[in-house]
Image (cartoon, grey):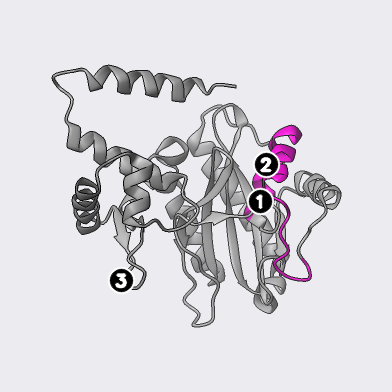
Amino acid sequence: MVDKGEERLSKARSEVNHSNYWVPILGSAIKILEIFYGAESDLTLHQVSAKAKVGKTSAFRILYTLDKLGYVEKDPVTGKYHLGLRIVAAARKTLAGGNLVQVARPHLKKLRDEFDETVNLAVLQKDEIVYVEILESPHPFRMTDTIGARIPWHSTALGKSIAAFLPEERVRAVLKQSPLKRFTGKTITSTREYAEVLIKVRDQGYSVDAEESELGATCIAAPIFGYENAVLGAVSLSGPTPRVQDKQNRVANSLKGVAASISRSLSSGYVDRLD
């Protein structure tokens, strides 16, 4: 099936290529940035040049400029390139309606200060779940990750909280493309078991990653809803297993309250799906 969005974009590019207003070097720079969006690993100058169909000299100059501006980064050891934090920060402002991080931040700070553990905010972007905000615990021994990092659907509390409120056929399609990888001895690797877990998440309104992603680490999450009560993302609290499990019920209740408050702020028509 042809993606109508991609079809429109291709048509628009064809039109502007014949326009007197078209700026070739800017067009090449954007094409190069787009190459990185679907890349699964760092890219060499030759790969960027070939994939973007931009001459190697021009590609080098563009990459050099983007690197200086922070939109791509060059690994000093391998000489390969990947997206920089500057573009992650720019994307974060537009993800999930644009104001999710701003709306959520005061709630995340309150949650972090209440439990002294790391608090995370993630959104669903197409078929990927991405961290858009992380407030770290003040403890020297804490759980943390990187803004912009992608999150597994099956082994994380954030992934389960989001998947539980999506159409079943969409979840099955994603899992078909991304097999259930085992990270620890406790990771769910059966689609049937995963489906049963999602039913439980819907019933209780929160999810748990009990050392399924990393031994010694436990994470609890609750879903966030937006327009027409569609799930947008999730908020979670993570930390060393003994600390988190000791207060699991309190954490779960606080997370559900915070997620509901964020959801109400994002959509005036929000109705609590977890009542």
Which amino acid type is marked by label 1?
Trp
Q: Circles 1 and 3: CB distance less than 8 Å?
A: no
Mark pair 3, 2: CA separation: 35 Å
Which quadrant of the view contains residue 229?
A: top right
Residue 174's disc is 2
Mark pair 2, 1: CA separation: 9 Å
Taking the spot 75% from the left edge, 35% from the top edge, the residue there is 168
Which amino acid type is marked by label 2?
Val
Taking the spot 54% from the left edge, 29% from the top edge, the residue there is 227
Which amino acid type is marked by label 3?
Pro
Query: Is 195 on the left or on the right of 61, as rendered?
Result: right
Query: Is 128 on the left or on the right of 6, as rendered?
Result: right
Residue 51 forms part of the magenta stretch? no
Q: Circles 2 and 1: CB distance less than 8 Å?
A: yes
Q: Which residue is mark 1?
A: 153
- Quadrant containing the C terminus is top right
* Residue 93 visible to an observer of this rendering: no
